[in-house]
Image: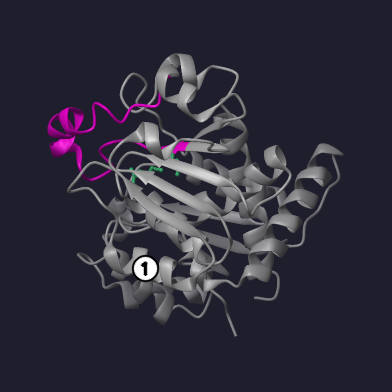
């Protein structure tokens, strides 16, 4: 049976752990310049409705390094939900390709793609979540802290798609997940409830970022206005102005803290240059690991296709 990756909660704790281990070994193989082509002859369709640097380039490079090939489809080609239904697109791409990565606005479209595709569907971000980012962030955390569980992460900013994937992770792995989110910008209540009910993690919403970051191992942030929310950007700048990751916030966390950002960053808004380019920042290790981790996802899901 084909397996999809639409959310962190699609996978068990063991599967998450195995994928991180596999990603680490693939990273080591690449460093040793070993050729590894388990996906030779396989193709991956990449259906993108939104812009992307990391997700597109990391998947394309990952697939190439595994011996496979990618076909990039911009909204102009496919017109998902307008020119053609997600169900029909899924059926057609499954006749050509061995896997599909999709970056979409509406989450229900990726669920529909997965339902009707006979090949694995991987979520490259929707308005609702971004599982590939958080899974690779867990790998980065493991590299820097020596563990991918039992750490404290403080997220500062919007209760958006990144937070939903972090909450999903917190329902599979044990962590302290403290969010500092302005009133009115909390994450989806069902996702929050699910993570709390799983009983693995200690999860709290704060309004004061200084309180949220106390003793944090990781401070994590993201843009204040996500892709698709451009019209709200000016309003959000005012709402979020006290939710900036800067030197003052870092002081409240302690000298051990590492800073992460999924990128792209709006420097001077949610994060200062000084923090982003400073000694606590691990944002470019984080960006690099997208590729290694996604190689592990592609290998797991597509090797038997
Ligand atoms: N972090 C991330 O997904 O980056 P892109 O939007 O550039 O793909
Ligand atoms: N929340 C951001 C994440 C970008 C990787 C967005 O959806 O634009």
Which one is in front, 284 or 71?
A: 284
Looking at the image, the residue that sits furthest to the bottom is 1
Camera-nearest residue between 220 and 247: 247
Q: Position of residue 263 (x, y in %)?
A: 44, 35
Quarter of the C terminus within the rendering: bottom right
Q: Is residue 34 left or right of residue 170?
A: right
Residue at 58%, 60% in the rendered image: 174
Disc 1 under 8 Å from ligand 2? The reply is: no
Say left or right for 155 vs 134. left
- Tell me the element at label 1: helix
Residue 57's place in the image compared with 81, above or below, is above
The residue segment tinted magenta is 220-246
Tell me how many marks there are. 1
The residue located at (58%, 70%) in the rendering is 98
Q: Quadrant of ligand 2?
A: top left
Q: Compared with residue 17, is residue 162 higher up or lower down, i.e. above or below? A: above
Is residue 53 visible from the viewing direction of this image? no
Judge whether residue 244 is colored magenta. Answer: yes
**Residue 304, quarter of the rendered image:** bottom right
x 66%, y 57%: residue? 68
Q: Which residue is mark 1?
A: 110
Q: Is residue 247 above or below residue 169?
A: above
**Residue 134 x %, y %:** 52, 51
The answer, for residue 30, to whether it is visible in the render is yes
């Amino acid at each position: 049976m084909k397996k999809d990756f639409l959310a962190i909660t699609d996978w068990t704790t063991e599967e998450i752990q195995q994928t991180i281990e596999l990603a680490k070994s693939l990273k080591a193989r690449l460093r040793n310049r070993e050729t590894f082509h388990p996906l030779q002859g396989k193709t991956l369709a990449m259906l993108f409705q939104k812009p992307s640097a990391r997700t597109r380039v990391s998947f394309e490079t990952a697939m190439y390094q595994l011996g496979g090939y990618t076909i990039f489809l911009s909204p102009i080609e496919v017109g998902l939900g307008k020119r053609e239904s997600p169900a029909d697109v899924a059926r057609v791409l499954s006749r050509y390709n061995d896997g599909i990565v999709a970056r979409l606005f509406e989450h229900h479209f990726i669920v529909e793609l997965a339902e009707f595709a006979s090949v694995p569907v991987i979520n490259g971000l929707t308005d609702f979540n971004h599982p590939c980012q958080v899974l690779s962030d867990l790998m980065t955390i493991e590299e820097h802290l020596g563990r991918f569980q039992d750490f404290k992460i403080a997220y500062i900013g919007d209760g958006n798609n990144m937070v939903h994937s972090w909450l999903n992770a917190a329902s599979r792995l044990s962590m302290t997940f403290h969010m500092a989110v302005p009133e009115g910008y909390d994450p989806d209540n069902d996702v929050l409830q699910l993570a709390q009910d799983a009983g693995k993690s200690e999860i709290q919403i704060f309004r004061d970022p200084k309180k949220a970051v106390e003793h944090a191992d990781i401070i994590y942030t993201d843009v204040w206005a996500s892709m698709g929310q451009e019209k709200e950007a000016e309003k959000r700048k005012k709402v979020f102005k006290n939710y900036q990751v800067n030197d003052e916030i870092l002081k409240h966390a302690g000298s051990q803290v590492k800073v992460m950002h999924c990128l792209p960053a709006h420097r001077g808004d949610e994060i200062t240059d000084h923090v982003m380019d400073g000694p606590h920042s691990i944002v470019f290790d984080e960006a690099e690991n997208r590729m290694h981790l996604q190689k592990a996802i592609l290998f797991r899901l597509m090797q038997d296709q």
